[in-house]
Image: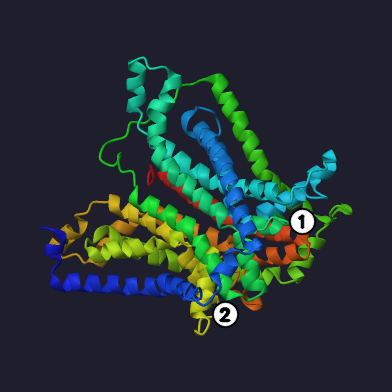
Amino acid sequence: MNFQGGLGRHGLRRITGIKLLIIAFLLVTVIFPLFAMLMYIPGTNIAGIVTAPQFKQALGNSFATAGTGTIISIVLAYMFAYCIARTTMRKQEVFTVLAAVPMLIPSISHGMGLLILLGSNGVITRLFRLSTSIYGFQGIVLGSVLYAFPVAFLMIVDILKYEDGSPYEAAEVLGIPRKNRFFAITFPYLRKPLISVVFAVFTLIFTDYGVPLMIGGRCTTLPVLMYQEVVGLLNFGKGSVIGALLLAPAVIAFLFDLFNKDRGNSNYVIQEISKRKNTPRDIAAFLYCMIVCFLIALPVLVFAILTFVKKYPVDMRFSFDNISNTLNMGAGRYLVNSLIIALGVSIIGTIISYVIAYFTARTPGRTSKLLHLISITSLAIPGLVLGLSYVLFFKSSFIYGTLAILILVNTIHFLASPYLMAYNSLGKLNMNLEDVGLTLGIKRSSIVRDVLIPQTWFTILEMFTYFFVNSMMTISAVSFLSPVRIKPVSLMITQFEATMQLESAAFVSLLILGCNFFLKGIIYAIRRQAKKTGELP
């Protein structure tokens, strides 16, 4: 019995109806807001905007910083991923965790960390009496590398982890020299997925405004220009033109990834690449990973220094004054806002993305394909662009200016990745479960509750964590939508940056890192316990 035939006409109509309702929801929350932003463009002097010296300079700066940051990030990340996936060095799990730490704080915190380390009165600047300036192009590139490196590393190590080892064994039997194997085997395998990584990292840096806002100085990028025009001057027309431009690289990356999925390994068993002990190589890999993790940890360490000194660099005595002053300015209240938003996004986002993934992965049909396409569309929308779109589309609605719209925009902003997690997990389970349940008189809801959810429980935990962590640290998607009374704590960093209260900004960064690290620790403990009990391989 096939699925659709056994389901019955009434059941098919009900499922199609649910999918159409979900499509309608996504149209209202994703597509229509984008159209609302684009509708501002026809009435704007586009030629005057794009020919202005300020715009040309920002565009050039964006491409230069994003291109340079992408190259450096991917080279460093590939070497780090190679050390983790191809060597037998010790503490690989520890290095993997440390490499992901920058993903737990906002991008603006990386810029601030560099400012504290290498700024005019920076720790390293004063220690070594340096005369070079970190502000401008070099500062943006360094901050972007700190921000983008963990993303590039996690993508590349995942690619290397699933590379088939059979060609390497065959090459060894045939006597092909080791130096020739990279271009004969590794590079052809990596070429297509690496292009996706390049697009993803370039888009991440190109559309970020946190790092350049903090440390860019006179080197203005397009996201910073858009932020200044919309927040500072309320120029929605110019902001919409810049927003449309920021969409371009993300859309190109999205389309490339959509039409160039490498499914070569999906139909056969992959043989794991054998790792042979090589002491000199493993020592070199260990030292490299130690250096990278130390550099990654420096901004976090310097946040702690600034938080617990009275006034850097004038008075370096230990003090809790910065913490009490920051809390007096509302940090505790705004942290509660962030936790409410993050928990709301995590619960609602996980439910929505799992339900969508269930229908797209396990119920065939044209509506499923359409639903899948719309669900991953948010991958191509930068946070700043989505935030501006929501301002223009929802500004007269009852949810505008409430916590509800902040929860909604974050849910949509981060929907695609958790959805794909659930989509891939549900697609790997036996596709005949619903058919068997139907013949036995078991309801579909019972199959989901008693079979699918237990089988994908750890994927659900990862989805929840992804929503929570990103909602705690995001700035871009909520910067246009947050009135003072309900703003999340992450926006206090921009507030303190504007008044050069770096000690308070450092404390806020530590707050966000602590909350995210606490949740990550809980998830790690659950997974470790599951491995001990045999629930997880």
Q: Which dot, 2 or 1, sits closer to the camera?
A: 2
Q: Residue furthest top?
A: 175
The answer, for residue 340, to whether it is visible in the render is: no
Image quarter where the N terminus lies is: bottom left
Image quarter where the C terminus lies is: top left
Q: Residue furthest right?
A: 314
Q: Position of residue 431 (x, y in %)?
A: 22, 54
Binning the other alpha carbons within 10 Å of mark 1 as few (below 14), some (14 to 19) or many (20 upward) gives many
Q: Position of residue 154 (x, y in %)?
A: 49, 44
Q: Amino acid at mark 1?
A: Thr
Q: Is residue 485 left or right of residue 521?
A: right
Judged from the image, the secondary structure of the residue bearing numbered disc 1 is helix
Q: Is residue 239 above or below residue 361?
A: below
* Residue 401 circle label: 2
Cα distance, mark 2 to mark 1? Answer: 32 Å
Q: Is residue 325 above or below residue 138?
A: below
Residue visible at 15% across and 63% down in the picture: 4
Binning the other alpha carbons within 10 Å of mark 2 as few (below 14), some (14 to 19) or many (20 upward) gives many
* Residue 307 circle label: 1
Q: Is residue 355 left or right of residue 347?
A: left
Image coloring type:
rainbow
Q: Is residue 158 above or below residue 16?
A: above
Dot placed on the residue nearer the N-terminal end, 2 or 1: 1
Q: Amino acid at mark 2?
A: Gly
Q: Position of residue 181 (x, y in %)?
A: 41, 23
